[in-house]
Each structure stands twice: as C-alpha cells, then as structure tokens.
Image: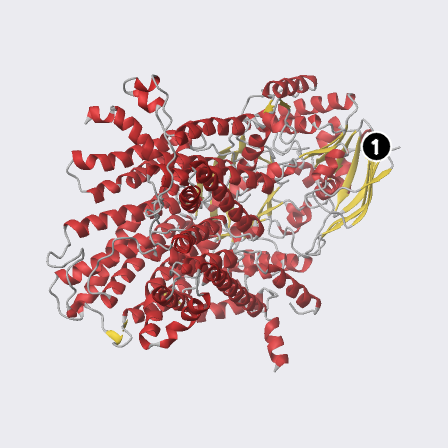
Amino acid sequence: MIQRVKALMRADGLRQAFFEVLRTLAAIVLALLVALLIILFTSQEPGRAIRIFLQAPFLSSYNFGQIITQSIPLIFTGVAVCLMIRAGQFNLFVEGAFFVGMLFGAVIAAGFKLPAVILPIVAMLLPALLAGLIGYLPAKMKSALNINEFVSSLMFNFIIFWVCLYLLNHHFLDPEYSSLATRTIPPAGKLFFLSVTNEVSSSFLIALGLAVLAWFFLNHTRWGYAIRMTGENPEFANFIGINVRAVVTRTQVLGAAIAGLGGAAFELGNFYRFNLKALPNYGFDGFIIAIIARNNPLLVPLVALFMGYLRAGAAQMALYSDVTNDVIYIIQAVMLILVGGQAFLSFLKKRSLRKAAREGGG
Amino acid sequence: MDHLALVAISKIYPNGVVANDHVNFTLRRGEIHAIIGENGAGKSTVMKVLYGLEKKDGGEILLDGKRLSINSPLDAITYHIGMVPQHSMLIDEMTVSENIFLGIEQQSGGLLDAKAMKRETAELGKRYNLWVDPLARCADLSVSQVQKVSILKSLVRGVEILILDEPTAVLAPQETRELFDQLKLLKQDGYSIIIITHKLKEIKQLCDRVTIMRAGRDMGVFDVADVSEEQISSLMIGGSIDLDIHKSPARPALDVLWVEHLRVARDNGTYAVDDISFTARQGEILCFAGVEGNGQRETVRCISGLEQKYQGTVELQGKDIRGMKIKDIRARGLSVIPEDRLKTGANGAASILDNLSAIAIDQHTRWGVIQYRRLKTRASEMIRRFDIKAKSFSQPLNALSGGNMQKVIVAREISADCALLVADQPTRGVDIGATNFIHKTLVTMRDAGKAILLVSSDISEVLNLADRILVFYKGQVSAEISDVDSLSEEQLGRYMLGMEKMR
Amino acid sequence: MIDFIFSETFLVSSLAYAMPIIFAGLAAYISKKAGLLNINIEGSMSMAALAGALVSYFSQSWVLGVVSAVITGMLMSLVLSACVMWLKTDSVLSGIALNTLASGLAVVILFAVLGVQGDTSSSPSLMIPVLNIPGLSAIPIIGRFLFQENVLVYVMISLAVLLWLVVERTRLGAHIKAVGYNAQAARSVGIRVERTRLVALLICGVFSGLGGAYLSMVYLSYFSVGMVAGRGFIGIAAEAMGAGNLLSTLFFAWLFGAVDYFATGAQSVLNVPYELLNTLPYLMTVIALVIYSLKPGLKKRSRKQRDPKPVSKEG
C-alpha cells in the first residue's frame, strides 16, 4: 500500500498537488492560530468564544444552513475573479457588479408581473447584462489605454455604490415600508428553498452550477483556452493568433456579468427586500477565495464553504460572546498572505524534489 | 608576468551543455586582446566568469600572479576589472553623470554634489575622447553614446582591465572608427583591454593578440600581425554539426512568399533591413545565412506579422499581408518556429497537449467545445513521430529539456498544413539527436512541396540544408547563392563576415 | 457659484478635505519612486487613524497621538515588506491582504479596548490644534488659508519639501530612483535593492500614518470604521497622474479633495442628491486617468534597437 502511494507520489503532477494542499492546510492552521491568539488576548472568556466559533455551525440545522448561505456570494464572486485572474487581470469590480445584481434583482422581481418560473430568470439575467455593460468600462480602459484595472475597478465600485444608493433612496423605495428598502419580492420571483428549516435556497445550486460551468468553460472551450494562454504568456497567445486585447476586455466583462448574476440570485434566493446601506465586501472576499482556490473554479465552492463555516461560526460568536465577527477578516488576510507566499514552505518542496531526483525518478 | 591569466576555466550549465572546456586566456599589460568565436563558442561565458556574472566549475583566475576569487561584479571591480556589457545596463530615466556615478555618488554636506560629478564626467570624457553631455538623459542617447557612458562608468571606478562585449555589434562604421581611436587612447594610458567579438576585420584594425574559441574550447592565442584572416576564420568556423543529410536535388515550383524592397528602420535612423528583395518557392529550402544581428530577425518579424512598421511589400501566396492579423496570416499558410522559444513560441506553464494543439484548436472545436479526444490522439501521434521524450502530455511544457521543448514547437508548427514554414535558428541550443531530427523533417517537408525559410548562423547547417542561400550582412543581401554544392565553407564565411560581396 | 469657488472658505475647506488624499499621494509617491505599487496605503491609514484616536484619548496628548499614528504607519510598511521580500507574496496580493487585515484588526481592537463597535465617538480623540499666526492671518482671502491652518498642514508642507530634497538631492534618493527605474541595473552597481525599498516603504508609512492621524484627529474627532473611504486609492490615482512629479501629485491630490468638498458643499447650493455628489471624487479620478492616458507626449519613447528586457514589478 505504501509502495503504491510512493509510486503515485513520484508522478510530478501529483507531487505538485500534494504540496499545494499541504501549504494550503498549513496556511489555514496558521491563520486560525493567529485568530485564536487574538481572541485569547481580547476576550474576557476566550475559551467559550473559541468553542462557539468552532462548534456553533454544527449545533443547529439553521446554523448549518448558514454555512451554505454565507458561502453563496463567495462562490459567485470567487468564480468571477477566477476567470479574470486566469486572463491576467486583477479586477475587483465584482464588488460593484454583485451589488448592482442584488439591487436590480430585487427591483425587477418586485416590479414586473411575470409568471413564476420566468420572473426569477429575467430578474437574474437582466442584472447580469447590466453589470456586464458597466464592467465594460474598466475593462476597455485596461485593454485600450492600459489603465491599471485594479485602481479603476475600485473607483467604479465606489461610483456604482453611490449611484445604486441614489436609485434606492429616490426611485426604488417602498413607500409603505418602515425602513429604507425596495418592495417585497413576490413569491413568483423568489428562488425556491432547498430546505425550509435551514433556509438554504436554490441559489446555492445555481452557484455550484456556475462553478462547474466556469471550470468547463475554462478548460474545455476555445474561449477558455484563449483566456488561459493570454494569462500565462500573452506573447505566445499573440503569436498563435489569439486577439489578446479582446480576451482581456471580454473576460473582465464576463466576470462582471457573473458577479451581477450572482448578486441577483443571492438576493432572490435569500431575501425579501434589498436594504443594504454599505458595500458588503463580497468582492474582496471573492478575490481571496479565488487565490486560495488556486484560480480553479472547481475548488472555489470548497474554499467558499470553508469560509462560510468560519463566517457562520464568527456570527454566532459575535452574538453570544464578546468577540466581534471581524476576526474573519484577519483569518482571511493571513491565509491570503501565506498561500500567496511563494517562499512559504517552498523549502519543503525543494528538498523533496531533490530527493526524488536522486532516487532517479523525478 | 601577465597582467591577467585565466587557467583551465570550465563551465557546465545545469542542462548539461559544456560552455567552457578548460579554456586558457592571458592578458598582457597595455595590450588590446580580442577573443573571437561564433555564437555559442563560449567567449561570452568565459568573460562572464571573469567578471563574476557566472560561477566557474573549474580553473583559476590569476591577477599579476595572485589567485583571485570573484563571485560577483562588485568583486571584479575591487580587482579593477570592469565590463562594458553588450546590452545597456544604464538607467534610461537618469542623466549620464547620474548613471556614471550610480552607487558611488559624490556628496558634499549630506547632499549630492551634482556639480562635482558633472565636472568629473566632462573631464574624464574629454581625456579619452569619450565626451558625452553629462546632463543628457540616457534615454536620448545613441547606441554609441551609451557605449561611451558605459566605458566611463568603468573608468570612474578605477578599473585597469576593461572587457568589452561585442562593442561594435550595432555600431555604424564611423562610430566603430571613433571607438577604436578611444580604445587606442586608453591603451596608451596603460589600460589592458579585452574585446569579445566575432568581427574579423576589426581585430586586424585594432588588436594586438587574438584568442580563438570554438565549441567551448580555446583554439590558441596568436599575435594579430602573424596570422591571416583566413587562418583565423578557419579555426573559428568549424562545423559544429557534422552530419550528412542525404538530400535529393530541389524541385522548386511556384512562388509562395514575395518580398520587395523591404526596409526596417531603427530608432536612431539607421536601417536594420536596408532594401531587401527575394522570393521563397514551394519545394525549396531558402536559407538566410549570416551572423546574428544583420537584419534577419527584423525580416522574419515582418513576414510573420509581428512587425507592422516597415517599408516595401510582403506578399504571402499572392496577398499583401500588411496590416493583417496574425491569425489571418497563419490561416493564409504560414507557420513559424520562432527564435526565442519560451518567450514567444511556447507557454511553459501550460501542458504539452495545450502547446501542441495551439494552432489546431479552432479546427477541432464543435459549438465552442474543444474536442480533446481528437486532439489527444493527434498529440500522441506527434509525440511518437517526433520522438518527444515526455511522460505524459498533461505535464507542463517546462518540465521538458530544451531540446524536447523545441521538438514540441517544431511538431506543432509542422503539423499545421502550411505553405511556408519559417524556421528561425531552430537547432540552437538543441542536442545532436534533436538537431538531426529537425533537419530531416525540414527536408521531408521540402520534398512534400512546402516552402522553407531557414534562418541560421551555423555554417554547416546552412551548407547541409540550403537549396538557395541569401547571406545577410549589415541589413543587405551580400550574396545570393543558388549552387550550394560548389560553395565552400571559407567562401561562405567570407560573405558572412563581410569580407566579400557578390553583387 | 464663481465667487463660491474663489472664496476664502473654499480655499481653506478644499485643503481640509484634500489633506488625507495629499498624505496618501505623498505616500504613494515615495513608494512608486522605489518601483512599488503600495496598495496598502488605505489599510495603513485606517490603522494609523485608530492608533491616533486611541492614544490621544488615553494619553490626552495630541503629540503622542500623532507619533503613535506615524509609528503604526511604519509598522504596516514593515509587515508589507516582510510579505513581499521575505515570504515572496506578490505585492498586490499582499496589499489586498493587509488591507483586509487592517479592517478586521481595527474592529477587533476597537471592541477589545473600548468595548464599542463602529467608532470611538464616545471617547473622542484629542484634536490636533490649529496654528494661528496673528496679524498675517487677517489678510483677506489668503490670510486664513496660509496662516491659520492646522499644525498638520504645516507639517505636510515641510515634509513635502524635505521629501523632495531627499529624492532629488541625496544619495538615498538617487538609489531609490535607480531601484525604481531599473532594479537590475541598480543591483549591478552594488545598490542593495531590498534595503533601499524597505527605506522607501518606511517613509511611505510615515505619510500614511500622518494621513490617518489627520482623519481621526482633525477631520473628525474620532475614529470610525471605513472612514478612509477609498482615499488611499485616490491618493494612488493622484500619484499616477502626477507621473513622478511631486508638485503635480500634490496638485491632483488637492484637486480631488476640492471636488470632494465641492460635492458636499454644493448639496445646499445645487439641487443634486448627495448620493450622486458623492460619486464625484471617484468619477473625476476615472476621467482624469483616461485623459492622462490619452495624452501622447507622456508615453516613454521605446528603444527598439536595444533588446527590450521585460520589466517586472519587483525588478
């Protein structure tokens, strides 16, 4: 048995993957340790806080459902960012795009009278289209004028946020509701619940489906091929006839559209109104998830679920102990730094590669 | 006693290539010593070892008889050894005097003493006829001015031994003459100078002694006065590939590529390609012979669509390709094996399968979905046919050896159904087996009626493969040879080194 | 409208709004000189603002508050350097990660130290005072603008001058610029690239720290989560438009601040909803970036005859 494993290990690709998994696990453990240390220092009853954090998601079916619910936006934005990073673009407009998706998903679903299956579909596709159109701006700025897409997409996030807030406060308000929100989404517009007790909606299925679709798109279609080649070696891509500029633009538009779709799906699946007053930060989080998932859309749901678990735990911890749930950000940050760090644990990889070379396999 | 002595220097690269094989080199005080050899002969490597840019695997460096250990350029400079690199190591955005004093800036009272540095730059420049405006931005300098600044940079750090790496590679004749006068001035002042070059004529004009290198070994050192250009060239240019390609005579047919009055300008106003016209025909291997840097690269770039700014006409299969997208040019029947493999010709991070299939993707797509099964069959066939040593085609390309990587690129380009194949230095840095294979493949393609355009600076490769030769020298065609069989190596060498011109 | 723009209030207030962006721009300026795009200015300012607010409240000394803010900024730079040069994480990723870390850490520390969420308004910071030069400050229009400004304004001016001196007239500055233009060439003459970059980042941290201090001790009298509101990034954009020129960077930073002030001030004057006005600074940045990139003369001339070496961000 061990011999078989060792033989498998000699295969280059598998060895590489093994090390990546090891590094990721090490990063997770270290990040959690940092968080636990912080909790230790800042809480009056750290033991209890930590227990709640780690266990609460499993203690009730609602909490367990929260793991999945919290992961849904992260899957959408994570997949969108994956695609864009594979094309070599560090574009963060997914934040604004997701926000647009949420607002317009709610507005369209509440505003149009359409039959039950068609309404949610329309209410998801239109915001996706809109998000893609807006996302075309920073995308074109990069491909035609070489303006750093990171800075421009950040600016657009803020612009879109304020424009959406304006639209909400001045055009889309529900006059009969007590606080600032859009009108209720009718049952025809909602996405069905997978399980009513957990409040896990079918938007989760859409997210998973999108992740699989994105993986297939990236690895088995000619457009995905063009994206991968452009991101890995744009000179080569140009050399074999790929229109690099077009790929750069279209990928960023696609990413924005996916995020828009995700926002609408998330809204329709889990809420009755849109009432956000601040950017929910799903964009940045999606970015971190994409990096930890090594830019592989198939791995995004896994990482997102893990993050969802952490978030659900942190939310419970915030409710029942004296630690705020922003500890999550610290964990995410440490994980990102460690996973992104080429030097992190690379000595392990080098030692073993040398050993393999000596053994004559490699 | 010799000023400098390199004894039995050896250098082996990790991929097994022996760059230097027990090379000996001596330098006398106050002499100008040339080290000459073809590309890949090892002359740059041995000097890089001396200057601390490469680590030697064997041998010793002796300065005035004392053993030295040089691990970095800074060590070399402390021993008063300086190098003027072939490609500019200047910071474009800074001025001449800022670059010269970079790292050793003069200060007065905590602030930079710009006036003193400017003064010294001017003085040093005037003394050795190397004057450049100290306040000029390096981005605005001509190539010969950049060279002057690089020399000054070494001088100001107190070097006594100056190494110049291919200094006349892109200089105009007048600039070359000016450089020689400056070097002679330095020599008079007691500097010892090493020149790495492949230009025979200039050695005769400038140098006292010459060390000849070939295939990693030194072929001896000679006083320039005692040896003729023919003797140097015969020691220098030996076939590095002795293989017999049995080639039936060519049967060229229709024109495939038509190039007329092609000119490509450099930034400084000179022409890299200066009025070249030729045709390439089906069933014929046309070879661009010549030392690198004489216009071949620019010509190939124009043909492949990578270079859009040119004067003249380029027609592929009857259609003017100016302004065409690369995808369309390829569809028109062009395949290219590019000169720099990893940068342009391949995607190292992608799998071998992805690299092999790069051009065929569009033909094997149904409704956007890539038909990988068919591509995998195709890839397996290609791996078998070209004897590519790889464990599986899902491996990333950069897991392969250099020769196998080149085979992948060759396999890909050849398997596209092209009318014209451009092969730019296809066997450089490739092992014997793969080289042989690539040669046989080119001949097979030619026999199948393709037009082959081979760019090579290896004389025996040229003589073995070409049906027709265009010799490039300084942006023009110095000779066109249709009767390759009766062409001797020496004669070809003379055309290549600019010693003779046919038209 | 016109006399609104040329009024004394406008001059003073536009500067007040612009100060955080100016500090961010100066921070971006020095890190760009060393060849680094420091995304983390935003997070550094946030942490520094928190530090300034807390320390000034507990110590009841604004000087200590400012000092702690500066130290915090420098600490963040140190962490960023460690990630980029030691762990070898890509600098953009590190910047994003540290921004995320800062936002989480700020809330956690806030909660742990003061037991509140959101802001420190219950424990207000000790504000940095205004320096008033009597007599001169009575000059109409420009009097208040020049002679009755906050201490940090005068600090900013002196430090900006000092920064320019260091960059253009000292050895350190020459080395920083060399590393930023061509790290390979700098290394070949013996310049210690990593060490030089670290020094530049530390200087950057000083300015981020001051920017944070201004936010929580002048602009507002407390720290609030998210108070930086993208000003770190606008500072980066201002530097991009300043294209390496200190005065231009300062000008654009001030311009963005003026637009920000105009957006707020114009609410009462014009009948435009405040949400749309809030987009103005960001919108202006985008438009400015586009215009700047369309100007042909600013593109560097390529030198094709020498082998173009690919320049990586890290050199």
Q: Residue furthest right?
A: B1
**Circle 1: residue type:** His
- Examine the rendered structure and indicate whether residue B453 appears above or below residue B210: below
Q: Is residue A110 left or right of residue C130?
A: left
- Examine the rendered structure and indicate whether residue C144 appears above or below residue A18: above
Pick whichever, A153 or C133, lies toward us.
C133
Whole-percent x and y of residue A121? 21, 66
Residue C256 at least partly seen:
no
Q: Is residue C272 left or right of residue B179?
A: left
Residue C120 at least partly seen:
yes
Residue of label 1: B3
Count of picture labels: 1
Q: Residue furthest bottom?
A: A1
Q: Quadrant of residue A147?
A: top left
Pick whichever, C45 or B34, lies toward us.
C45
- Examine the rendered structure and indicate whether residue B87 appears above or below residue C40: above
Whole-percent x and y of residue B347? 51, 56
- Neighbourhood count class around disc 1 (C-alpha, 10 Å): few under 14, some 14–19, many 20 upward: some
Pick whichever, C284 or C105, lies toward us.
C105
Protein image colouring: secondary structure
Whole-percent x and y of residue A227? 41, 56
Q: Is residue B159 left or right of residue B259?
A: right
Pick whichever, B63 or B496, lies toward us.
B63
| Residue under the point 43% across and 62% down | A44
Mark 1, chain letter? B
- Quadrant location, the N terminus of chain B: top right
Tag 1 secondary structure: loop
- Quadrant location, the C terminus of chain B: top right
Whole-percent x and y of residue B102? 62, 30
Q: Quadrant of residue C275?
A: top left
